[in-house]
Amino acid sequence: MDTAKYVVAQVNPNMPRTHGDGFIHISKIHAMVWHESALPVVDYSAGVTPAIESIGRNVAALIEDGATLQLGIGTIPDMVLRNLTTHKDLGLHTEMMSDGVIPLIESGVINNARKKLNTGKTVTSFMTGTENSTASCMIIPPSA
């Protein structure tokens, strides 16, 4: 943005607000386009097969309490998350998160207490999922 000759921002009131380096002062924007639309929906649970369920269980069994997770995108990472409900003090430092993260944060399984970097904070760049995950993310306190 600092080197662009012209900056256009698309404004969608349905987009959740995030924290971090994503803030842009209005003085840096030359034009804003209002585009109110629903956010895309991705439901990774729709593609679950018995083999993916087994992979999710097996991978989750390898994760130790206190581990910091970096997640991938898709049905397998979401199935791994579903199998982490009995773990303790997990951390999250990842590019992307999806629906499977929400119940783990809400239940305290992911609390970031033992992370060496950004202790106590979930770090992510973006989220994808269903309407439920977007709504839940908007109510997760900033300390999560």
Image (spheres, rainbow, N blue to C red):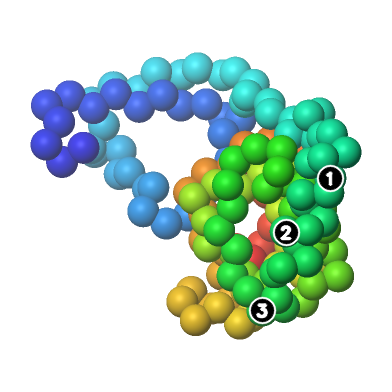
Q: Amino acid at mark 2?
A: Val
Label 3–label 2 contact, CB within 8 A: no
Local packing at callout 2 (Cα closer than 10 Å; few below 14, some 14-19, many 20+) is: some
Q: Earlier in the sequence, mark 3 or mark 1?
A: 1
Report helix, strand or loop for mark 2. Answer: helix
Q: Nearer the viewer, residue 27 or 117?
A: 117
Q: Nearer the viewer, residue 18 or 87?
A: 87
Which residue corresponds to the image point at 11% horizontal and 36% vertical from the top-left? 3
Residue picked out by circle 3: 66
Report helix, strand or loop for mark 3. Answer: loop
User: From mark 3 to mark 1, how far is it between C-alphas?
Assistant: 23 Å
Residue picked out by circle 1: 53
Q: Earlier in the sequence, mark 2 or mark 1?
A: 1
Q: Nearer the viewer, mark 3 or mark 2?
A: 2
Using the image, determine if residue 126 lies above or below residue 94.
above
User: From mark 2 to mark 1, how far is it between C-alphas?
Assistant: 10 Å
Q: Quadrant of residue 73?
A: top right
Q: Amino acid at mark 3?
A: Gly
Question: Does residue 104 appear in the picture of this structure?
Answer: no
